[in-house]
Image: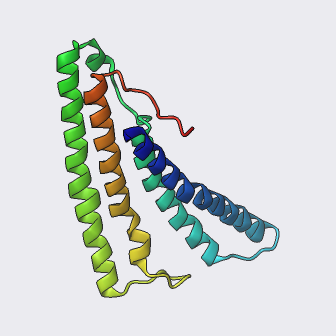
Amino acid sequence: MLATIHRTLDRLVLAITIPLTVAMLGCVVWQVVARYALNVSTSATDEIARFAFIWVSLLGSAYVLGRRGHIAITGLVDLLPARPRGGVEIAIATLVALFTVTILCGGGWLLVDKARTLGQVTPALQLPMWIVYAVIPLSGVLTLIYMAIALMESLREGPGVSNHAVSLD
């Protein structure tokens, strides 16, 4: 059940980030061609590339956390016996959850709400800024879900055992 939820969440995040990455690449290539070959500048593609990069970065960071591919210095933790190692894993998960709830979910929601209330729009596309900012609390929710899955796997399988990436197959 847990693996099914994890795979479904992974597929959902990839279904969003892969097309955004392709769009970002297309926009950047077009900007280079337009600027150097055609001697024109396009602000719309610049904005699309920038906002796609923001979404891919934040959603990608949640995805990488879920795949347990984030940067970690594990040398000291790996030296610990199983019981203290489990405690350290729980402490780390708790700190990540506190940061995520406070900064990404709480702060992100305040930013989305403020941009929506003020009616902020992007300069070139006239897109509401709250749509751009919405990825902050969204990535926070995804991070919390991924962290909960990782913690449940860790508790079920034992400390350090579930330090593997989940296959999409």
Q: Quadrant of the C terminus?
A: top right
Point out residue 142 in the picture as x, y percentages from the top left corner. 36, 53
- Which of the 4 image quadrants contains residue 168? top right
Q: Residue furthest front?
A: 1
The colour scheme used to paint the residues is: rainbow
Depth check, front residue: 28 or 112: 112
The residue shown at (54%, 52%) is 14
Residue 48 relative to residue 3: left or right: right
The residue shown at (47%, 34%) is 166
Depth check, front residue: 126 or 159: 159
Vertical relation: 114 (above or below) 58:
below
Q: Residue furthest right?
A: 37
- Which of the 4 image quadrants contains residue 131? bottom left
Residue 136 relative to residue 54: left or right: left
The residue shown at (44%, 50%) is 9
Vertical relation: 153 (above or below) 145:
above
- Which of the 4 image quadrants contains residue 155? top left
Point out residue 138 in the picture as x, y percentages from the top left corner. 36, 61
Residue 41 relative to residue 160: left or right: right
Point out residue 153 in the picture as x, y percentages from the top left corner. 32, 32
Depth check, front residue: 91 or 8: 8
Q: Quadrant of the N terminus?
A: top left
Point out residue 8 in the picture as x, y percentages from the top left corner. 47, 49
The residue shown at (33%, 79%) is 115
Q: How many marks?
A: 0
